[in-house]
Image (cartoon, rainbow, N blue to C red):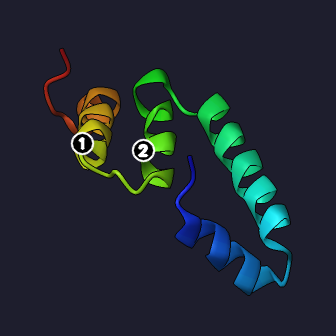
Amino acid sequence: MQNQNIVQLVAEKTGISDQQAREAVNTVANYLKEKLPGPLDGQIDNLLRADVSGVADQAENFVKDKMGGLFGGKKD
């Protein structure tokens, strides 16, 4: 399920129909889900439903895990 606000925003900004905007949002969402690592790919659907609870925490944990050693932090 998509956040209708996103579909409307895409339609308004691009001048395309709501159906075309819906397809565009689906295409981008599916592309991002394929490219993002496992812990983050499921958050695309949450964002589209406007359920952002937990997204920031998961993103922070992912960044800490992947980048911790780069800046001298402890990497488990």
Circle 1 SS class = loop
Q: Which residue is mark 2?
A: 46
Q: Is residue 52 left or right of residue 46?
A: left
Q: Is residue 73 left or right of residue 52?
A: left
Establish if 76 lies above or below 69. above
Q: Position of residue 46 (x, y in %)?
A: 42, 44
Q: Position of residue 41 (x, y in %)?
A: 50, 32
- Around disc 2, counting alpha carbons within 10 Å, would you say few (fewer than 14), some (14 to 19), or many (20 or more)? some
Q: Nearer the viewer, mark 1 or mark 2?
A: 2
Circle 2 SS class = helix
CB atoms at circles 1 and 2 under 8 Å apart? yes
Amino acid type, residue under disc 2 in the picture: Asn
Residue for point 69% across, 38% down: 30
- Looking at this view, name the residue that lies furthest to the left: 74
Q: Is residue 33 left or right of residue 19?
A: left
Q: On the rendered image, what quadrant is the C terminus found in?
A: top left
Establish if 76 lies above or below 56. above
Amino acid type, residue under disc 1 in the picture: Gly
Establish if 2 lies above or below 60. below
In which quadrant of the rendered view does residue 64 lie?
top left
The Cα atoms of the two marked residues, 1 and 2, are separated by 9 Å
Q: Position of residue 18 (x, y in %)?
A: 77, 70
Residue for point 52% across, 60% down: 3
Q: Position of residue 54 (x, y in %)?
A: 24, 42
Instruction: Say whether residue 70 is visible.
Output: no
Q: Which residue is mark 1?
A: 54
